[in-house]
Image (cartoon, grey):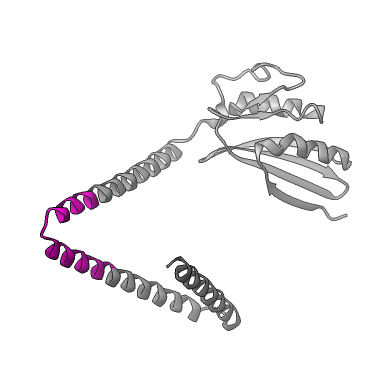
Amino acid sequence: MALHTSFETIEIADLVALAERKRDEGYRFVQMLCVNTEQGIDALYSFMKGDRLENYTIAGIDTATQSVPSVTGVFLAAFPFENEAHDLFGLNVTDIAIDFAGKFYKVAMDTPMTVISPAQKAAREKAAKIAAAKAAKAAGKDASADDLEAKLAGMDPEKAAKVRAAMEAKAAREKAESARAKQAELEEKLAGMDPEKAAKVRAAMEAKAAREAAQEKGGE
């Protein structure tokens, strides 16, 4: 008998209702496991019936601000998994039917499964620095725009109009150059594709461009 497996992402608020539905449909609870990710803790719940194994993931749980309701009111067998999620990953699971209150495991440190390697730490710090640099750059652009507007406001109106026109023309040229570069890159990719697939991609892009043009015209 072949096993049919499926995966789906759900929200925290949908978890208990999902468990109740699976119970009513005759599924049994298989497991609940956690994974430490860059976005937070992913909690995966698995249910099985016959040859169907269904997996549902709550992604990116922030353990500092979010909690997850227990499904032990529906499937009592979930209690060891939920206690494990708490002790090893720091996941706050509320209303566990058999709650070990943090003493399910005897561990040398709190939430050991969330400890990251030096390489992971370096990668996260690098990502944070890049995000901070982008934010600072965006803030700098906003400040520069404000400074420019202040300068234009103090200029002779005719001169200010010429400066604005020159800036708008430059922005239009840069936009056109960027569009041409993207188009050239796309054409190169399409040339390497299967002709039928390339035709479908072109058709989809043309349809998207037509929709955008219609939206711009409607907004005028």
Q: Residue drawn 35% across and 46% down? A: 130
Reply yes or no: does residue 153 show up in magenta.
yes
Q: Residue 65 sits in which quadrant?
A: top right
Give residue 102's position: percent from left, percent from top: 64, 18
Pick the quarter of the image with the C terminus: bottom left
- Residue 208: give x, y in percent of width and height: 52, 71
Residue located farthest toward the front when viewing the structure as drawn: 157
Q: Residue at x 77, y 46 (%)?
A: 54
Tell me where the magenta segment starts and ends, as one range.
Answer: 144-171
| Percent position of residue 78, x then y | 77, 29
Q: Please identify the dominant SS of the magenta region.
A: helix
Q: Residue at x 56, y 25 (%)?
A: 111
Q: Is residue 12 left or right of residue 156?
A: right
Against 219, residue 23 (above or below) is above
19 up-or-down from 97: above or below: below
Q: Nearer the viewer, residue 200 or 116?
A: 200
* Residue 51 position within the rendered picture, expressed as x and y whole percent measured from the top left: 86, 50
Locate residue 50 relative to residue 73 in the image: left or right.
Answer: right
State which quadrant residue 109 falls in.
top right
Drawn side of residue 57 relative to residue 97, left or right? left
Nearer to me, 212 or 67 = 212
Q: Which of the 4 quarters of the picture holds residue 193?
A: bottom right
Residue at point 32%, 69% (across, down): 175
Please say if 152 is above or below 210: above
In this view, the residue in front, 62 or 44, is 62
Q: In the image, is residue 81 part of the stretch drawn in magenta?
A: no
Quarter the N terminus occupies = bottom right
Numbered marks: total: 0
Pick out the residue farthest to the bottom.
195
* Residue 20 in the figure: left or right of residue 181: right
Seen as rendered, the residue at the extreme left is 156
